[in-house]
Amino acid sequence: MEQPKEVITFDPNEFVLMDLNQLPSRLLENAVNEFAKLPGIGKKTALRLVLHLLNQSETDTMQFTKTIEEMKKQVKTCNKCHNISEDELCSICSNPNRDNSVICVVESIKEVIAIENTSQYKGLYHVLGGRISPMDGIGPKDLNIESLIERTTKEPIHEMILALSTTMEGDTTSFYIYRKLSSSNVVLSTLARGISVGDELEYADEITLGRSLVNRIPYHGK
């Protein structure tokens, strides 16, 4: 009769007290280093996460790794707005109940999630993939600006909301888009200044962000 495998458990707190440069296993150290690459995760937190996985059953651990692998292989960006999607068009662009005459221009997918959480916006989006920043070597051609301009010629866009961060880079990006669309009939607006100057949009609370969307103001390149 086959003997059941011995289950080995680890106390994360016990290992955290150790010198993280002297872990007892090379494989453990490699795993900790990979987790520590995640934003906001230090070596101690990474070690706790790795030890937690080691304490789980093999089935649970394999399900965890399978989920991450599937996400990496199957999640892509929407062909129209560059939002996260599993198909050619994301669930927002393909939703017939959304207002296709309004586009909200954001820097990243994080802002899409933040705005959707307000439940105050029913239009479409366009994710730029960043903001113009000469100091970081990021110019207009590095962003999804040309595809945004192209959408105004192919879709019935009446209004474009420039929901970019109120930083120098965000204002520069908004002004660039304003100049590119100066000869079009698209109405440009920006968030009301319930969002403090210099703040990142993703960190605004839902109530403030929602009110800023509802009370948006015309944008005239200033």
Image (tube, rainbow, N blue to C red):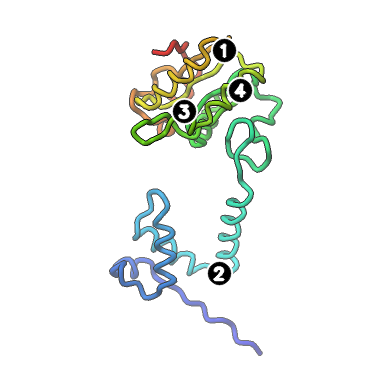
Could you tell me residue 222's position as x and y percent? 39, 13
Marks 2 and 4 sit apart, C-alpha to C-alpha, by 51 Å
Identity, as a three-letter code, of the amino acid under mark 1: Val
* Left or right: where 195 falls relative to 184: left
Query: Could you tell me which secondary element the residue under label 4 belongs to?
Result: helix
- Measured along the vertical axis of the image, is residue 2 above or below residue 30? below
Label 2 close to label 4 by CB (< 8 Å): no
Q: CA distance from mark 2 to mark 3?
A: 49 Å
Q: Which residue is mark 3?
A: 140
Marked residue nearer the N-terminal end (4 or 1): 4
Q: Secondary structure at mark 2?
A: loop
Question: Where in the figure is residue 52, as x and y percent of width and height?
Answer: 46, 64
Q: Secondary structure at mark 3?
A: helix
Viewer-nearest residue: 9 or 109: 109
| Residue 186 image label | 1
Of the image marks 1 and 3, the number of the one nearer the N terminus: 3
Badge 1, how many Cα within 10 Å: few under 14, some, many 20+? some
Depth-wise, is mark 2 or mark 3 nearer the camera? 3
**Which residue position is annotated with label 4?**
150
Q: Which residue is drawn at the image coordinates 51% and 14% (left, top)? A: 188
Gap in angstroms between the C-alphas marked 2 and 1: 56 Å
Q: Is residue 174 visible?
A: yes
Q: Earlier in the sequence, mark 2 or mark 1?
A: 2
Measured as percent of width and height from the top left, residue 207 is found at 45, 26
Kindly identify which residue carries mark 2. Answer: 57
